[in-house]
Amino acid sequence: MRRAILASPNSQPLLPKLANIVGAKHVITDPDVMAPHLSEWRKLYTGKAQALVRPSSTAEVSAILRLAHETDTPVVPQSGNTGGVGGQIPDQSGRAILLSLARMDRVRDVQPLSNMMTVEAGVILQNVQAEAEKADRFFPMSLPSEGSCMIGGNLATNAGGTGVIAFGNTRDLVLGIEVVLPDGRIWNGLSGLRKDNAGYEMKHLFIGSEGTLGVITAATLKLFPRPRSRVTGFIGLASPEHALKLLARAQGGSGGTVTTFELLPRLGIDMALKNGAGVRDPLAGKHDWYVLLEVSSQDADGLQDKVEMMLTGAFEAEEAEDAVLASSLDQRMNLWKIREDLPFAQATEGASIKHDISVPIASVPAFMAEALAMLAEKFPGCRPCPFGHLGDGNLHFNVTQPVGADGQAFLALYDEMNAAVFDIVARYGGSIAAEHGVGQHKRKLLPRYKDPVALDLMLTLKKAIDPRGIMNPGKVL
Ligand SMILES: Cc1cc2nc3c(=O)[nH]c(=O)nc-3n(C[C@H](O)[C@H](O)[C@H](O)COP(=O)(O)OP(=O)(O)OC[C@H]3O[C@@H](n4cnc5c(N)ncnc54)[C@H](O)[C@@H]3O)c2cc1C
Protein backbone atom coordinates (compact mmCIF):
# COMPACT_ATOMS: atom_id res chain seq x y z
CA MET A 1 0.00 0.00 0.00
CA ARG A 2 1.34 3.48 -0.88
CA ARG A 3 1.98 5.91 1.92
CA ALA A 4 0.68 9.44 1.55
CA ILE A 5 3.39 12.09 1.23
CA LEU A 6 2.80 14.21 4.28
CA ALA A 7 2.99 17.97 4.30
CA SER A 8 6.39 18.94 5.67
CA PRO A 9 7.03 22.13 7.67
CA ASN A 10 9.23 23.33 4.76
CA SER A 11 6.56 23.11 2.07
CA GLN A 12 4.42 26.07 1.09
CA PRO A 13 3.58 28.22 4.14
CA LEU A 14 -0.12 27.36 4.11
CA LEU A 15 0.32 23.62 4.40
CA PRO A 16 2.10 23.51 7.77
CA LYS A 17 -0.58 25.76 9.18
CA LEU A 18 -3.23 23.38 7.88
CA ALA A 19 -1.23 20.50 9.37
CA ASN A 20 -1.36 22.25 12.75
CA ILE A 21 -5.15 22.25 12.50
CA VAL A 22 -5.91 18.73 11.27
CA GLY A 23 -2.66 16.85 11.84
CA ALA A 24 0.01 16.36 9.16
CA LYS A 25 -1.32 13.05 7.91
CA HIS A 26 -4.60 14.70 6.97
CA VAL A 27 -2.97 17.28 4.70
CA ILE A 28 -2.34 15.08 1.69
CA THR A 29 -0.23 16.11 -1.29
CA ASP A 30 0.65 12.71 -2.79
CA PRO A 31 -0.60 12.92 -6.43
CA ASP A 32 -1.69 9.27 -6.41
CA VAL A 33 -3.80 9.67 -3.29
CA MET A 34 -5.25 12.94 -4.53
CA ALA A 35 -5.97 11.73 -8.08
CA PRO A 36 -9.37 10.07 -7.43
CA HIS A 37 -10.53 13.28 -5.73
CA LEU A 38 -9.42 15.47 -8.64
CA SER A 39 -11.63 13.91 -11.29
CA GLU A 40 -15.23 12.75 -11.33
CA TRP A 41 -17.21 9.75 -12.57
CA ARG A 42 -18.39 11.37 -15.77
CA LYS A 43 -14.74 12.09 -16.70
CA LEU A 44 -15.70 15.58 -17.85
CA TYR A 45 -13.69 17.50 -15.25
CA THR A 46 -10.25 17.20 -13.71
CA GLY A 47 -8.53 19.72 -11.48
CA LYS A 48 -5.51 20.53 -9.34
CA ALA A 49 -5.20 21.45 -5.68
CA GLN A 50 -2.48 22.41 -3.19
CA ALA A 51 -3.62 19.63 -0.89
CA LEU A 52 -6.47 17.39 0.10
CA VAL A 53 -7.37 18.41 3.66
CA ARG A 54 -9.39 16.07 5.87
CA PRO A 55 -10.81 17.72 9.01
CA SER A 56 -12.60 15.63 11.63
CA SER A 57 -14.66 18.28 13.42
CA THR A 58 -16.61 21.48 12.92
CA ALA A 59 -13.97 23.35 14.93
CA GLU A 60 -11.29 22.16 12.49
CA VAL A 61 -13.38 23.22 9.48
CA SER A 62 -13.81 26.61 11.13
CA ALA A 63 -10.06 27.03 11.66
CA ILE A 64 -9.36 25.98 8.05
CA LEU A 65 -11.82 28.51 6.63
CA ARG A 66 -10.49 31.29 8.89
CA LEU A 67 -7.03 30.57 7.50
CA ALA A 68 -8.31 30.39 3.92
CA HIS A 69 -10.12 33.70 4.42
CA GLU A 70 -6.95 35.38 5.75
CA THR A 71 -4.82 34.03 2.91
CA ASP A 72 -7.37 34.35 0.09
CA THR A 73 -7.13 30.62 -0.53
CA PRO A 74 -9.95 29.05 -2.55
CA VAL A 75 -11.72 26.15 -0.82
CA VAL A 76 -13.54 23.38 -2.69
CA PRO A 77 -15.72 21.22 -0.42
CA GLN A 78 -15.99 17.58 -1.41
CA SER A 79 -18.09 14.83 0.16
CA GLY A 80 -18.65 11.60 -1.82
CA ASN A 81 -17.48 12.99 -5.20
CA THR A 82 -20.56 11.66 -7.00
CA GLY A 83 -21.81 15.10 -8.08
CA GLY A 84 -22.89 15.30 -11.71
CA VAL A 85 -21.82 18.84 -12.66
CA GLY A 86 -18.17 19.06 -11.58
CA GLY A 87 -18.93 21.24 -8.53
CA GLN A 88 -16.67 19.17 -6.28
CA ILE A 89 -13.63 19.39 -8.59
CA PRO A 90 -11.21 22.34 -8.31
CA ASP A 91 -10.04 24.32 -11.34
CA GLN A 92 -6.66 23.84 -13.03
CA SER A 93 -4.87 26.69 -11.21
CA GLY A 94 -3.75 24.48 -8.32
CA ARG A 95 -4.46 27.29 -5.83
CA ALA A 96 -7.39 25.67 -4.05
CA ILE A 97 -7.45 23.33 -1.12
CA LEU A 98 -9.80 20.41 -1.51
CA LEU A 99 -11.75 20.04 1.73
CA SER A 100 -12.93 16.48 2.25
CA LEU A 101 -15.78 15.96 4.71
CA ALA A 102 -15.29 12.18 4.75
CA ARG A 103 -13.88 12.00 8.30
CA MET A 104 -16.87 13.85 9.72
CA ASP A 105 -19.00 10.74 9.72
CA ARG A 106 -20.58 10.63 13.18
CA VAL A 107 -24.25 10.16 13.91
CA ARG A 108 -24.66 12.70 16.69
CA ASP A 109 -28.18 11.93 17.83
CA VAL A 110 -31.28 9.91 16.89
CA GLN A 111 -34.61 10.90 18.45
CA PRO A 112 -37.39 8.56 17.27
CA LEU A 113 -40.10 10.30 19.31
CA SER A 114 -39.31 13.62 17.64
CA ASN A 115 -38.81 11.82 14.32
CA MET A 116 -35.39 13.35 13.74
CA MET A 117 -31.70 12.57 13.69
CA THR A 118 -28.57 14.72 13.61
CA VAL A 119 -25.64 13.54 11.50
CA GLU A 120 -22.37 15.01 10.37
CA ALA A 121 -21.78 15.96 6.76
CA GLY A 122 -19.60 12.96 5.93
CA VAL A 123 -22.13 10.25 6.80
CA ILE A 124 -22.83 8.16 3.68
CA LEU A 125 -26.50 8.33 2.67
CA GLN A 126 -26.93 4.55 2.97
CA ASN A 127 -25.69 4.73 6.56
CA VAL A 128 -28.23 7.48 7.33
CA GLN A 129 -30.97 5.19 6.02
CA ALA A 130 -29.62 2.27 8.09
CA GLU A 131 -29.42 4.35 11.31
CA ALA A 132 -33.01 5.44 10.81
CA GLU A 133 -34.07 1.84 10.32
CA LYS A 134 -32.33 0.79 13.55
CA ALA A 135 -34.62 3.25 15.34
CA ASP A 136 -37.66 1.80 13.50
CA ARG A 137 -37.87 4.92 11.38
CA PHE A 138 -37.50 5.69 7.68
CA PHE A 139 -35.28 8.23 5.93
CA PRO A 140 -36.76 8.42 2.43
CA MET A 141 -33.98 9.95 0.34
CA SER A 142 -32.80 7.36 -2.18
CA LEU A 143 -30.33 7.80 -5.05
CA PRO A 144 -28.49 5.22 -7.15
CA SER A 145 -25.28 6.71 -5.67
CA GLU A 146 -26.45 6.23 -2.06
CA GLY A 147 -23.60 3.84 -1.25
CA SER A 148 -21.03 6.60 -1.70
CA CYS A 149 -22.65 10.05 -1.69
CA MET A 150 -22.67 11.81 1.69
CA ILE A 151 -25.33 13.81 3.42
CA GLY A 152 -23.27 17.04 3.18
CA GLY A 153 -23.12 16.62 -0.61
CA ASN A 154 -26.82 15.73 -0.73
CA LEU A 155 -27.67 18.96 1.09
CA ALA A 156 -25.25 21.07 -0.91
CA THR A 157 -26.84 19.83 -4.16
CA ASN A 158 -30.41 19.60 -2.80
CA ALA A 159 -30.40 16.07 -4.22
CA GLY A 160 -33.58 14.53 -5.57
CA GLY A 161 -33.79 10.83 -6.38
CA THR A 162 -36.59 8.34 -6.57
CA GLY A 163 -38.47 9.28 -3.38
CA VAL A 164 -39.15 12.93 -4.26
CA ILE A 165 -42.61 12.15 -5.57
CA ALA A 166 -43.76 11.32 -2.02
CA PHE A 167 -41.31 13.08 0.29
CA GLY A 168 -39.85 16.02 -1.64
CA ASN A 169 -36.26 17.01 -2.39
CA THR A 170 -33.49 17.06 0.21
CA ARG A 171 -34.53 20.51 1.43
CA ASP A 172 -37.92 19.09 2.39
CA LEU A 173 -36.21 16.52 4.61
CA VAL A 174 -34.12 18.92 6.68
CA LEU A 175 -35.04 20.57 9.99
CA GLY A 176 -31.77 22.37 10.61
CA ILE A 177 -28.13 22.63 9.57
CA GLU A 178 -24.74 23.60 10.96
CA VAL A 179 -22.60 25.67 8.60
CA VAL A 180 -19.12 27.12 8.71
CA LEU A 181 -19.12 30.48 6.94
CA PRO A 182 -16.30 31.55 4.62
CA ASP A 183 -14.71 33.67 7.39
CA GLY A 184 -14.68 30.71 9.78
CA ARG A 185 -17.72 31.64 11.88
CA ILE A 186 -19.95 28.72 12.83
CA TRP A 187 -23.72 29.01 12.46
CA ASN A 188 -25.36 26.38 14.61
CA GLY A 189 -28.76 26.11 13.03
CA LEU A 190 -29.32 22.53 14.17
CA SER A 191 -32.81 23.29 15.33
CA GLY A 192 -35.21 20.40 15.58
CA LEU A 193 -38.12 22.82 15.28
CA ARG A 194 -40.85 22.12 12.80
CA LYS A 195 -42.22 25.62 13.18
CA ASP A 196 -40.01 28.69 13.38
CA ASN A 197 -41.06 31.87 11.62
CA ALA A 198 -38.62 34.13 13.45
CA GLY A 199 -37.18 35.79 10.39
CA TYR A 200 -35.65 34.50 7.18
CA GLU A 201 -35.21 30.74 6.79
CA MET A 202 -31.44 30.73 6.46
CA LYS A 203 -30.94 26.99 6.00
CA HIS A 204 -32.51 27.11 2.56
CA LEU A 205 -29.80 29.52 1.41
CA PHE A 206 -27.13 26.93 2.02
CA ILE A 207 -29.08 23.87 0.88
CA GLY A 208 -28.50 23.69 -2.87
CA SER A 209 -25.72 26.30 -2.84
CA GLU A 210 -23.17 23.72 -4.09
CA GLY A 211 -20.43 24.79 -1.67
CA THR A 212 -20.40 28.42 -2.84
CA LEU A 213 -21.62 30.00 0.41
CA GLY A 214 -20.07 27.90 3.18
CA VAL A 215 -19.36 24.38 4.37
CA ILE A 216 -22.26 22.34 5.75
CA THR A 217 -20.86 20.34 8.66
CA ALA A 218 -24.00 18.68 10.10
CA ALA A 219 -27.75 18.43 9.63
CA THR A 220 -30.84 17.55 11.60
CA LEU A 221 -32.96 15.37 9.32
CA LYS A 222 -36.64 14.45 9.38
CA LEU A 223 -37.54 10.82 9.96
CA PHE A 224 -40.80 9.09 9.05
CA PRO A 225 -42.68 5.99 10.20
CA ARG A 226 -41.32 2.91 8.49
CA PRO A 227 -43.68 1.59 5.78
CA ARG A 228 -45.19 -1.74 6.87
CA SER A 229 -45.76 -2.99 3.33
CA ARG A 230 -44.46 -2.17 -0.09
CA VAL A 231 -45.33 -3.32 -3.60
CA THR A 232 -42.91 -2.92 -6.50
CA GLY A 233 -43.96 -3.34 -10.10
CA PHE A 234 -42.75 -2.88 -13.65
CA ILE A 235 -45.36 -1.84 -16.17
CA GLY A 236 -45.12 -1.82 -19.95
CA LEU A 237 -47.03 0.93 -21.75
CA ALA A 238 -47.30 2.74 -25.05
CA SER A 239 -46.21 6.31 -24.37
CA PRO A 240 -45.39 8.98 -21.77
CA GLU A 241 -49.06 10.14 -22.05
CA HIS A 242 -50.17 6.67 -20.94
CA ALA A 243 -47.65 6.80 -18.11
CA LEU A 244 -49.08 10.12 -16.88
CA LYS A 245 -52.59 8.68 -16.84
CA LEU A 246 -51.31 5.68 -14.91
CA LEU A 247 -49.59 8.02 -12.43
CA ALA A 248 -52.87 9.82 -11.72
CA ARG A 249 -54.65 6.48 -11.33
CA ALA A 250 -51.98 5.11 -8.97
CA GLN A 251 -51.94 8.26 -6.85
CA GLY A 252 -55.73 8.28 -6.71
CA GLY A 253 -56.27 4.69 -5.69
CA SER A 254 -53.54 2.12 -5.17
CA GLY A 255 -54.13 1.63 -1.46
CA GLY A 256 -50.98 3.44 -0.41
CA THR A 257 -48.57 6.24 -1.25
CA VAL A 258 -46.80 6.21 -4.62
CA THR A 259 -43.20 6.42 -3.47
CA THR A 260 -41.55 5.75 -6.84
CA PHE A 261 -42.69 6.39 -10.40
CA GLU A 262 -39.79 6.14 -12.85
CA LEU A 263 -40.17 6.24 -16.62
CA LEU A 264 -37.83 4.23 -18.87
CA PRO A 265 -37.76 3.77 -22.65
CA ARG A 266 -37.28 0.34 -24.27
CA LEU A 267 -33.79 1.43 -25.37
CA GLY A 268 -32.90 1.82 -21.68
CA ILE A 269 -34.04 -1.73 -20.93
CA ASP A 270 -32.01 -3.02 -23.89
CA MET A 271 -28.92 -1.15 -22.67
CA ALA A 272 -29.35 -2.46 -19.11
CA LEU A 273 -29.82 -6.03 -20.39
CA LYS A 274 -26.76 -5.78 -22.60
CA ASN A 275 -24.39 -4.00 -20.25
CA GLY A 276 -25.69 -4.56 -16.70
CA ALA A 277 -24.58 -7.67 -14.81
CA GLY A 278 -27.42 -10.13 -14.08
CA VAL A 279 -30.28 -7.88 -15.27
CA ARG A 280 -33.38 -9.78 -16.51
CA ASP A 281 -36.05 -8.48 -18.93
CA PRO A 282 -38.96 -7.67 -16.60
CA LEU A 283 -41.81 -8.58 -18.98
CA ALA A 284 -42.32 -11.29 -21.62
CA GLY A 285 -43.04 -8.93 -24.52
CA LYS A 286 -41.45 -5.65 -25.56
CA HIS A 287 -43.09 -2.27 -24.93
CA ASP A 288 -42.11 1.19 -26.06
CA TRP A 289 -42.08 2.58 -22.51
CA TYR A 290 -41.94 1.22 -18.97
CA VAL A 291 -42.67 2.47 -15.48
CA LEU A 292 -40.99 1.30 -12.29
CA LEU A 293 -43.71 1.77 -9.68
CA GLU A 294 -43.47 1.44 -5.94
CA VAL A 295 -46.39 1.89 -3.57
CA SER A 296 -45.90 1.92 0.21
CA SER A 297 -48.38 1.67 3.04
CA GLN A 298 -48.58 1.76 6.82
CA ASP A 299 -50.94 -1.23 6.64
CA ALA A 300 -49.14 -4.54 6.89
CA ASP A 301 -51.65 -6.46 4.70
CA GLY A 302 -53.74 -6.01 1.60
CA LEU A 303 -51.57 -3.64 -0.43
CA GLN A 304 -50.76 -6.12 -3.20
CA ASP A 305 -54.49 -6.76 -3.85
CA LYS A 306 -55.19 -3.04 -4.07
CA VAL A 307 -52.31 -2.40 -6.50
CA GLU A 308 -53.51 -5.34 -8.62
CA MET A 309 -57.01 -3.83 -8.70
CA MET A 310 -55.59 -0.48 -9.72
CA LEU A 311 -53.63 -2.17 -12.54
CA THR A 312 -56.71 -4.07 -13.71
CA GLY A 313 -58.41 -0.70 -14.10
CA ALA A 314 -55.38 0.57 -16.03
CA PHE A 315 -55.50 -2.42 -18.43
CA GLU A 316 -59.24 -1.91 -18.99
CA ALA A 317 -58.68 1.76 -19.77
CA GLU A 318 -55.80 0.75 -22.06
CA GLU A 319 -53.38 2.88 -20.09
CA ALA A 320 -51.07 -0.09 -19.48
CA GLU A 321 -50.18 -3.09 -21.67
CA ASP A 322 -48.58 -5.53 -19.24
CA ALA A 323 -47.23 -5.54 -15.70
CA VAL A 324 -45.36 -7.62 -13.18
CA LEU A 325 -45.39 -7.18 -9.43
CA ALA A 326 -42.36 -8.42 -7.50
CA SER A 327 -43.21 -11.45 -5.41
CA SER A 328 -39.83 -11.76 -3.70
CA LEU A 329 -37.00 -9.55 -2.56
CA ASP A 330 -34.87 -10.96 -5.39
CA GLN A 331 -37.48 -9.93 -7.97
CA ARG A 332 -37.76 -6.49 -6.41
CA MET A 333 -33.97 -6.06 -6.56
CA ASN A 334 -33.99 -7.05 -10.25
CA LEU A 335 -36.64 -4.47 -11.06
CA TRP A 336 -34.73 -1.76 -9.22
CA LYS A 337 -31.43 -2.87 -10.77
CA ILE A 338 -32.71 -2.09 -14.26
CA ARG A 339 -33.30 1.51 -13.23
CA GLU A 340 -30.19 1.87 -11.12
CA ASP A 341 -27.84 0.32 -13.71
CA LEU A 342 -29.16 2.49 -16.51
CA PRO A 343 -26.69 5.42 -16.13
CA PHE A 344 -23.76 2.98 -16.19
CA ALA A 345 -25.28 0.84 -18.96
CA GLN A 346 -25.65 3.97 -21.04
CA ALA A 347 -22.02 4.94 -20.40
CA THR A 348 -20.93 1.54 -21.77
CA GLU A 349 -22.71 2.35 -25.05
CA GLY A 350 -20.32 5.24 -25.73
CA ALA A 351 -20.45 9.00 -25.29
CA SER A 352 -23.67 10.64 -24.10
CA ILE A 353 -24.87 14.22 -24.07
CA LYS A 354 -26.98 14.77 -20.96
CA HIS A 355 -29.80 17.08 -20.04
CA ASP A 356 -31.02 16.99 -16.45
CA ILE A 357 -34.22 18.93 -16.98
CA SER A 358 -37.67 19.46 -15.53
CA VAL A 359 -40.92 20.75 -16.97
CA PRO A 360 -44.39 20.92 -15.43
CA ILE A 361 -45.53 17.29 -15.07
CA ALA A 362 -48.43 17.58 -17.50
CA SER A 363 -46.08 19.00 -20.16
CA VAL A 364 -43.70 16.03 -20.17
CA PRO A 365 -45.32 14.22 -23.15
CA ALA A 366 -45.45 17.34 -25.33
CA PHE A 367 -41.92 18.36 -24.38
CA MET A 368 -40.68 14.87 -25.10
CA ALA A 369 -42.38 14.68 -28.52
CA GLU A 370 -40.96 18.05 -29.56
CA ALA A 371 -37.45 17.39 -28.26
CA LEU A 372 -37.26 13.90 -29.82
CA ALA A 373 -38.43 15.24 -33.19
CA MET A 374 -35.82 17.99 -33.02
CA LEU A 375 -33.04 15.46 -32.27
CA ALA A 376 -34.08 13.19 -35.14
CA GLU A 377 -33.94 16.12 -37.54
CA LYS A 378 -30.78 17.89 -36.32
CA PHE A 379 -28.70 14.99 -35.00
CA PRO A 380 -29.56 11.97 -37.17
CA GLY A 381 -28.53 8.59 -35.78
CA CYS A 382 -28.20 9.75 -32.18
CA ARG A 383 -29.91 7.50 -29.62
CA PRO A 384 -32.09 9.41 -27.14
CA CYS A 385 -32.62 7.51 -23.90
CA PRO A 386 -34.78 9.80 -21.74
CA PHE A 387 -35.56 8.30 -18.35
CA GLY A 388 -36.24 9.34 -14.80
CA HIS A 389 -38.60 10.83 -12.33
CA LEU A 390 -41.80 11.35 -14.31
CA GLY A 391 -43.74 12.00 -11.12
CA ASP A 392 -41.58 15.11 -10.54
CA GLY A 393 -41.52 16.22 -14.19
CA ASN A 394 -37.76 15.59 -14.07
CA LEU A 395 -36.13 13.65 -16.87
CA HIS A 396 -32.57 12.69 -17.56
CA PHE A 397 -32.95 13.52 -21.23
CA ASN A 398 -29.76 11.72 -22.20
CA VAL A 399 -28.66 11.20 -25.77
CA THR A 400 -26.17 8.45 -26.66
CA GLN A 401 -23.88 8.61 -29.66
CA PRO A 402 -24.88 6.82 -32.87
CA VAL A 403 -23.78 3.17 -33.02
CA GLY A 404 -20.15 2.98 -34.20
CA ALA A 405 -19.68 6.76 -34.28
CA ASP A 406 -16.62 8.55 -32.92
CA GLY A 407 -17.33 9.47 -29.30
CA GLN A 408 -15.23 12.63 -29.29
CA ALA A 409 -16.83 13.87 -32.50
CA PHE A 410 -20.23 13.30 -30.91
CA LEU A 411 -19.22 15.14 -27.72
CA ALA A 412 -18.14 18.09 -29.86
CA LEU A 413 -21.89 18.59 -30.41
CA TYR A 414 -22.46 19.05 -26.65
CA ASP A 415 -23.10 22.81 -26.61
CA GLU A 416 -25.15 22.80 -29.80
CA MET A 417 -27.39 19.95 -28.61
CA ASN A 418 -27.70 21.43 -25.10
CA ALA A 419 -28.84 24.75 -26.54
CA ALA A 420 -31.40 23.10 -28.82
CA VAL A 421 -32.86 21.01 -25.97
CA PHE A 422 -32.71 23.74 -23.32
CA ASP A 423 -34.49 26.23 -25.58
CA ILE A 424 -37.41 23.80 -25.80
CA VAL A 425 -37.27 23.30 -22.01
CA ALA A 426 -37.40 27.07 -21.53
CA ARG A 427 -40.45 27.34 -23.77
CA TYR A 428 -42.25 24.87 -21.50
CA GLY A 429 -41.32 26.96 -18.44
CA GLY A 430 -38.88 24.29 -17.26
CA SER A 431 -35.49 24.18 -15.55
CA ILE A 432 -32.18 23.31 -17.21
CA ALA A 433 -30.76 22.07 -13.89
CA ALA A 434 -33.50 20.08 -12.21
CA GLU A 435 -31.57 17.76 -9.96
CA HIS A 436 -27.80 17.80 -10.27
CA GLY A 437 -27.32 21.55 -9.96
CA VAL A 438 -25.15 23.96 -11.91
CA GLY A 439 -21.56 23.37 -10.78
CA GLN A 440 -19.09 24.22 -13.54
CA HIS A 441 -21.07 22.28 -16.12
CA LYS A 442 -23.96 24.72 -16.51
CA ARG A 443 -22.43 27.86 -15.07
CA LYS A 444 -22.17 29.66 -18.39
CA LEU A 445 -25.76 28.75 -19.26
CA LEU A 446 -27.26 30.28 -16.14
CA PRO A 447 -27.39 33.91 -17.40
CA ARG A 448 -29.34 32.76 -20.46
CA TYR A 449 -31.94 30.69 -18.63
CA LYS A 450 -32.19 32.11 -15.07
CA ASP A 451 -34.52 34.98 -14.33
CA PRO A 452 -32.27 38.11 -14.26
CA VAL A 453 -33.72 39.37 -10.98
CA ALA A 454 -33.13 36.01 -9.31
CA LEU A 455 -29.59 35.92 -10.70
CA ASP A 456 -28.93 39.42 -9.37
CA LEU A 457 -30.17 38.36 -5.91
CA MET A 458 -27.86 35.33 -6.03
CA LEU A 459 -24.87 37.55 -6.83
CA THR A 460 -25.80 39.96 -4.03
CA LEU A 461 -26.01 37.11 -1.51
CA LYS A 462 -22.72 35.61 -2.70
CA LYS A 463 -20.93 38.95 -2.24
CA ALA A 464 -22.47 39.47 1.21
CA ILE A 465 -21.64 36.02 2.58
CA ASP A 466 -18.36 35.36 0.76
CA PRO A 467 -16.90 38.81 -0.02
CA ARG A 468 -13.46 37.38 -0.89
CA GLY A 469 -14.93 34.78 -3.20
CA ILE A 470 -13.00 31.88 -1.66
CA MET A 471 -15.87 29.37 -1.55
CA ASN A 472 -15.83 27.07 -4.55
CA PRO A 473 -14.91 29.72 -7.12
CA GLY A 474 -15.95 29.13 -10.72
CA LYS A 475 -19.02 27.18 -9.70
CA VAL A 476 -22.69 28.18 -10.14
CA LEU A 477 -22.03 31.95 -10.56
C1 LIG B 1 -24.93 6.73 -10.43
C2 LIG B 1 -25.36 8.08 -9.94
C3 LIG B 1 -26.70 8.35 -9.81
C4 LIG B 1 -27.13 9.59 -9.33
N1 LIG B 1 -28.45 9.81 -9.20
C5 LIG B 1 -28.88 10.97 -8.69
C6 LIG B 1 -30.27 11.20 -8.49
O1 LIG B 1 -31.11 10.36 -8.75
N2 LIG B 1 -30.63 12.40 -7.98
C7 LIG B 1 -29.72 13.38 -7.66
O2 LIG B 1 -30.12 14.45 -7.20
N3 LIG B 1 -28.41 13.18 -7.86
C8 LIG B 1 -27.96 12.02 -8.35
N4 LIG B 1 -26.62 11.81 -8.55
C9 LIG B 1 -25.67 12.91 -8.29
C10 LIG B 1 -25.03 12.89 -6.90
O3 LIG B 1 -25.05 11.59 -6.32
C11 LIG B 1 -25.72 13.86 -5.98
O4 LIG B 1 -25.54 15.16 -6.49
C12 LIG B 1 -25.21 13.84 -4.54
O5 LIG B 1 -26.09 14.61 -3.75
C13 LIG B 1 -23.79 14.39 -4.38
O6 LIG B 1 -23.30 14.02 -3.10
P1 LIG B 1 -21.75 13.85 -2.84
O7 LIG B 1 -21.57 13.54 -1.41
O8 LIG B 1 -21.14 12.89 -3.77
O9 LIG B 1 -21.23 15.33 -3.14
P2 LIG B 1 -19.95 15.80 -3.96
O10 LIG B 1 -19.98 15.25 -5.33
O11 LIG B 1 -18.72 15.58 -3.20
O12 LIG B 1 -20.22 17.38 -4.04
C14 LIG B 1 -21.30 17.90 -4.77
C15 LIG B 1 -21.37 19.42 -4.60
O13 LIG B 1 -21.63 19.76 -3.23
C16 LIG B 1 -20.55 20.53 -2.67
N5 LIG B 1 -20.37 20.00 -1.32
C17 LIG B 1 -20.11 18.71 -0.98
N6 LIG B 1 -20.10 18.58 0.35
C18 LIG B 1 -20.35 19.82 0.87
C19 LIG B 1 -20.48 20.32 2.19
N7 LIG B 1 -20.36 19.53 3.25
N8 LIG B 1 -20.73 21.64 2.35
C20 LIG B 1 -20.87 22.45 1.28
N9 LIG B 1 -20.76 22.03 0.01
C21 LIG B 1 -20.52 20.72 -0.19
C22 LIG B 1 -19.37 20.30 -3.59
O14 LIG B 1 -18.49 21.38 -3.56
C23 LIG B 1 -20.07 20.15 -4.93
O15 LIG B 1 -20.38 21.41 -5.44
C24 LIG B 1 -26.17 10.59 -9.02
C25 LIG B 1 -24.80 10.31 -9.15
C26 LIG B 1 -24.39 9.06 -9.60
C27 LIG B 1 -22.92 8.79 -9.68
Image (cartoon, helix red, strand yellow):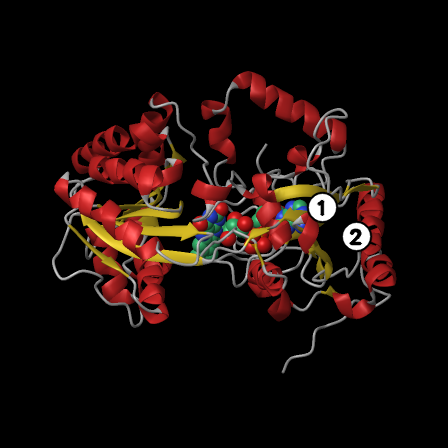
Q: Is any atom of residue 380 visible in this view?
A: yes
297 displayed left or right of 244: right
Q: Nearer the viewer, residue 180 or 254?
A: 254
**Label 2 with label 1: CB-CB less than 8 Å:** yes
In primary-sequence order, the first of circles 2 and 1 is: 2
Looking at the image, residue 113 lies above or below residue 337: above
The amino acid type, in three-letter code, at marker 2 is Val
Q: Is any atom of residue 98 visible in this view?
A: no
The amino acid type, in three-letter code, at marker 1 is Val
Residue found at the far bottom of this picture: 1
Q: Quadrant of the N terminus?
A: bottom right
Residue picked out by circle 2: 61
Which residue is depicted at the point 37% across and 69% down? Answer: 329
Q: Nearer the viewer, residue 280 or 407?
A: 280
Dot 2 crowding, Cα within 10 Å, few <14, some 14–19, many 20+: many
Task: Look at the numbered disc 2 and say if its residue's Cβ is closer than 8 Å to ligand 1.
Answer: no
Q: Quadrant of residue 370?
A: top left
Looking at the image, residue 400 lies above or below residue 29: above
